[in-house]
Amino acid sequence: MKSLYIISLVFVSTILLADVPRDKVKLLQWAGPPGSRPGTFKEWIVSHPYTKFSVRLDKTVIGNRKAGTVAILIDSTIASSLTSEINRLMTNLQWEGYTVSSYEISGGTPASLRSFLEDIYIIDNIEGALFIGDFPVAWFQVGMDYNSPQYGYVEWPIDFFYMDLDGNWLDTLKHGVGDTLIPGQDGIYDTHSGDVAPEIYIGRLTPTGIGNDILLIKNYFSKDNAYRHHTIELQHRALVYIDDDWEPVAPWWARDVAILYSDTLVVADSNTTRASDYKVRIDTVREWVSVFAHSYPGGHKFYYDNHSSEDYYWSEEYTSQDPPSNFYNHFCCSFARYTTNGYGGGRAIFTQSYGVGAIGSTKTGSMLDFDYFYQPLSEGKTMGAAFKEWWDYIASGGITIDELYWHYGMTLLGDPFLKPTGHPIDNLSPQISNTTVWSDTSLHGPFPVYSMITDNWKVGKSQLWYKTSVDTNWASLQMDTTGIANQYLAEIPFQPTIDTVWYYIYCEDIALPPNTAKDPVNAPDSCYSFITGYIGTEQGVPKIPKAFFVSQNYPNPFISSTEIKYGFPEDANINITIYNLSGQKVAVLVNEKKKAGYYTVRWNGENKYGKKVANGIYFYRLKSCSYTATKKMYFVR
């Protein structure tokens, strides 16, 4: 069994095999039905005329510098329908450390869009961008593809135009008679020179002619989020499916894919590879599929019976079959030609349940030197970063005409910020500490409640929940930051009668789904509580507290003065002293014997010499023979 022999080579290939010489690789061919051909720039521009370019910054979120800066560009005609999806993607990226800006784009030419990318590359140092929707398409042309009359004149969409931002892209020639290019301009680029290495990577979500654009993109982002959170992340194994013309080099290409996933199945037998077999193979759960076949945007053509017969796996079958695979590398002629309705590369990622990324070409050509792509992927890099590293290798020392023929149609479909090795999961809950604990008090409110809340990335929603003996329904209050790091505040409102108040803190981080925390941890079964309006013996409330207590000062932070309420159930020697962060004594507020009861003391922010203290954090400590308590307060002048 030849295919089994090839599988065994995968695991020793890094020692036994060198790279495949480029001139030994059979050229791809357009495999459409008789009379079919690629669409042209003139046909495309009729339905996509250039209009005035405009751009609007929608939103920016700041990362933690663990990752770079990226941009999301959204077609303005669909932006409002994708608000929640874009916000969710930006939240995911922000949690991973990225700083992200989203822009609404309208109209323009390829040159104006590229100029904008150049601007944000220079200003924001973006590493990559995602195009969502319909954008100006840059086209490129050559007079004699692969220097062969069999291929002749060709023109194709080129996303590399948006990746190399400082190279020279010129339109100085136009299509003449037959396969010739003559001086002139026709809106199609024909020359690329200067520094030809890419500055950024580009991924695109362009569901041309596949269905309802908005619904398809919405569903894509649902899968994208599910993949990031491991809901549809599949077994880390790959299928390498190689049709007849490349059977001799199958061991090399299997080795390259195995750099990413060592569990790689290779099928490369000339009498096995055909559409019916491919359809069965891709029904097995695998994270990655690499298919090598003569193709066109409408499907893959496979040969069998010793190359005497052929059959097709049609592009729409990706839609109807919904294969359980998330990533594709299509070594398939023009399969990523996103200007063609229903193109196969798009159908592979706009399926219902799976499919989030694909590499392919918009012309007769593909990726070679695959190891320069799979190696960075195996290191945990994103699809976009690996794609750029592969281009860096191709462009090193300049791009040869043969490399231009093979690679200038290469396109990344889908979210370029995804990692085929998987994404980290935030499963750490926020931490809540130093919540204000109110004791029984003569006050009726309002009652400020402070908490210190931290998270390993970012706190999302923070709430104070409370109820009273008068209104037994739980109510929530949004906690706001106070300006002091990690401190949050909400106020329980005024209570007009003697009342019991129960309260607790609830918060979420920004993970999807969020991690949550409560203080006390088993709330609402166990809560903080206190009695308001606690004076005299009115309605059975005693004059003397049941235990020692000292309340959180109010207001806090404070500018001029603040009050501290305290109490104790028996006569006691009481000392209340203020300390600074260094532990030095600042002022003594109380130092005497007192009878049991409730008391209030005020501090005006002065030290023992009568001078105002500096801004900052201070501590007050209540101490008696049997009780000690220390609390923190903030003085702001």
Image: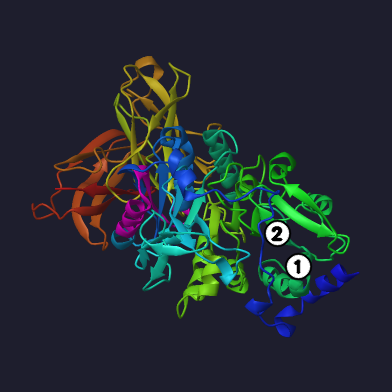
Residue plotted at (18% across, 53% down): 615
- Determine whether the residue tagged by mark 2 lies in a helix, strand or loop: strand
- The residue range painted magenta reads 94-120
Mark yes or no: residue 509 visible: no
Q: What amino acid is labelled 1 in the image? A: Asp
Looking at the picture, how far across and down is residue 298, in whole percent? 66, 47
Which image quadrant is residue 78 in? Answer: top left
Looking at the picture, how far across and down is residue 621, in whole percent? 30, 50
Residue 151 numbered mark, or none: none
Q: Earlier in the sequence, mark 2 or mark 1?
A: 1
Image height of 488 relative to 81, above or below = below
**Residue linked to disc 1:** 245
Looking at the picture, how far across and down is residue 252, in whole percent? 71, 75
Residue plotted at (54% across, 57% down): 412
**Residue linked to disc 2:** 294
Image height of 513 relative to 252, above or below = above
Q: What amino acid is labelled 2 in the image? A: His
Alpha carbon distance from label 2 to label 1: 9 Å
Mark yes or no: residue 257 visible: yes
Residue 481 or residue 170, whichever sits in front: 170
Residue plotted at (71% across, 43% down): 322
Q: Do the residues labelled 2 and 1 touch (CB within 8 Å)?
A: yes
Does residue 390 appear to the left or right of 175 in the view shown? right
